[in-house]
Image (spheres, rainbow, N blue to C red):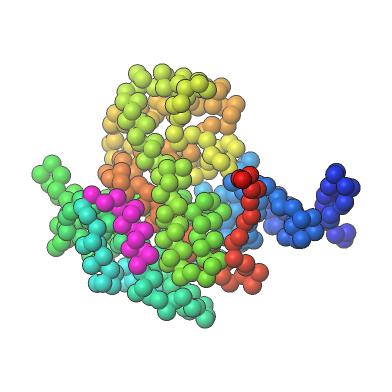
């Protein structure tokens, strides 16, 4: 079989450069231009890396043209709501879904690893009440590297496995405690009798002694429908190929930094409103619209190129039509609305925005469909999750993707430190 190559011609002098074309299991072919600068004395220019494959990976695949997302070859629609989030974690880390015995053992291990070193708790005392949970969460995760510094050097699969499972187990605890710290109330320790997602809701809502938050004169219990919904949201956020935060984790990891430091850098990147903070912006915008009677006016504002207003939660950098995660969340939202008897002004405004936008040629022709952020913010609000915790919940789901990507990076013998170049236009 003939070798696949691409020839580039410098039209200034007629010089030709030939490069191998590499094919993956799925997706576009890739031109291997690693020697391009050496050959030609030039750099390639690709702001935002829109046409650049920065690595080789076996973890997650996205087909943006056909609205497809797969973890280790498995369609997201076959995982979310059908397997537990911890089973999906195992899949991303190990490559296959666990059998029942392995699943139970993994669940039990995660429960017991969810407790924090008491020294970590002292860090929370240094943060003021009112600090955003993302700021505290990122700082505490960074601090984990000082408590588990030996994992800077990982010599075998057992060491990798212990490091990965530890961070997955502790992230929900840190996130819940970050929220409790932000509102100045006592923190709740994990309960090993509760499953991962239920345990997070418990730590978020309960007070010392296990007493649940009191609403309307009665204690609020955690319902299974809430656990199932949040579990599915974690799964939908678990990984998403080489997005901004994952690329950040890989870039920091390429320097040889501690894995938990790399995860902390991913948390910082995720906090941005153009990335993980987008669902908070969706909710702010729905509150701005305020009433279903105002929706049409704001839709027209979004269509006016001279108006600075932009409709949040629609369209996606990668998906050119529908976001497959949003499709799953839409079904979940409808189920929650029925099971929890939800009827709020916010939900009604969101439904009207969705209805008008999906029937408007302006949005249809541009492929501007609701994305995961549009539905996740509405669902988290329905689950009584504080808005300041929307992005930390994204962190809880995405940690397994980050640590799986980090592991793949450091175990790849071809890995080099990330060092892009630039087009200099200064003095």
At x 66%, y 69%, the residue is: 414
Residue 390 at least partly seen: yes
Residue 222 visible, this orientation: no
Q: Is residue 246 left or right of residue 184?
A: right
340 shown above or below 149? above
Nearest the eye: 418 or 358: 418
Q: Is residue 138 magenta?
A: yes
Judging depth in this view, the residue of 135 and 101 nearest the camera is 135
Left or right: where does residue 342 sit relative to residue 185?
right
Q: Residue at x 32, y 30 (%)?
A: 287
Q: Using the image, determine if residue 109 lies above or below residue 40.
A: below
Horizontally, is 32 left or right of 136 in the view?
right
Residue 338 position within the rendered picture, expressed as x and y whole percent measured from the top left: 33, 37
Q: Quadrant of the N terminus?
A: bottom right
* For residue 385, side relative to residue 74 (left or right): left
Residue at x 28%, y 36% (from the top left corner):
341
Which portion, as a residue range, is magenta?
130-143
Which residue is rendered at x = 54% and y = 61% of the image? 250
Residue 177, given in percent of the width and then of the height, sits at 26, 59
Question: For the view shown, which residue lies furthest in the left direction?
Answer: 217
């Amino acid at each position: 079989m003939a070798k696949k190559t691409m020839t580039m011609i410098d039209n200034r002098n007629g010089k030709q450069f030939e490069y191998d074309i590499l094919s993956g299991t799925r997706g576009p072919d890739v031109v291997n231009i690693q020697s391009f600068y050496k050959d030609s004395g030039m750099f390639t220019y690709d702001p935002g890396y829109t046409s650049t494959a920065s690595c080789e990976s076996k973890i997650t695949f996205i087909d943006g043209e056909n609205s497809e997302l797969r973890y280790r070859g498995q369609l997201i629609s076959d995982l979310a709501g059908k397997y537990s989030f911890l089973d999906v974690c195992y899949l991303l880390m190990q490559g296959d879904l666990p059998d029942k015995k392995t699943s139970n053992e993994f669940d039990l291990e995660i429960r017991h690893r969810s407790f924090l070193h008491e020294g970590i708790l002292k860090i929370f005392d240094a943060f003021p009440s009112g600090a955003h949970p993302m700021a505290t969460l990122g700082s505490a995760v960074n601090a984990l590297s000082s408590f588990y510094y030996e994992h800077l050097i990982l010599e075998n699969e057992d060491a990798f496995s212990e490091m990965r499972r530890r961070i997955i187990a502790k992230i929900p605890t840190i996130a819940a405690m970050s929220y409790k710290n932000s509102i100045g109330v006592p923190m709740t320790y994990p309960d090993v009798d509760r499953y991962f997602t239920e345990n997070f809701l418990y730590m978020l809502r309960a007070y010392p002694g296990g007493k649940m938050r009191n609403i309307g004169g009665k204690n609020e219990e955690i319902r299974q429908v809430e656990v199932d919904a949040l579990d599915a949201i974690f799964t939908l956020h678990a990984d998403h190929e080489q997005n901004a935060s994952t690329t950040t984790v890989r870039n920091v990891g390429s320097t040889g930094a501690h894995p938990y430091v790399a995860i902390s850098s991913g948390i910082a990147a995720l906090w941005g409103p153009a990335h993980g903070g987008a669902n908070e912006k969706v909710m702010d915008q729905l509150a701005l619209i305020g009433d279903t009677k105002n929706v049409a006016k704001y839709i027209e504002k979004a269509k006016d190129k001279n108006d600075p207003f932009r409709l949040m939660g629609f369209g996606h950098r990668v998906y050119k039509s529908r976001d497959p995660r949003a499709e799953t969340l839409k079904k979940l939202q409808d189920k929650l609305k029925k099971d929890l008897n939800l009827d709020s002004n916010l939900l009604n405004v969101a439904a009207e925005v969705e209805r008008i936008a999906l029937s408007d040629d302006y949005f249809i022709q541009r492929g501007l469909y609701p994305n995961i952020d549009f539905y996740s913010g509405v669902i988290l609000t329905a689950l009584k999750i504080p808005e300041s915790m929307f992005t930390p919940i994204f962190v809880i789901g995405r940690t397994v993707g980050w640590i799986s990507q980090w592991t793949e990076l450091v175990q790849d013998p071809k890995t080099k430190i990330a060092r892009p170049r630039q087009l200099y236009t200064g003095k």
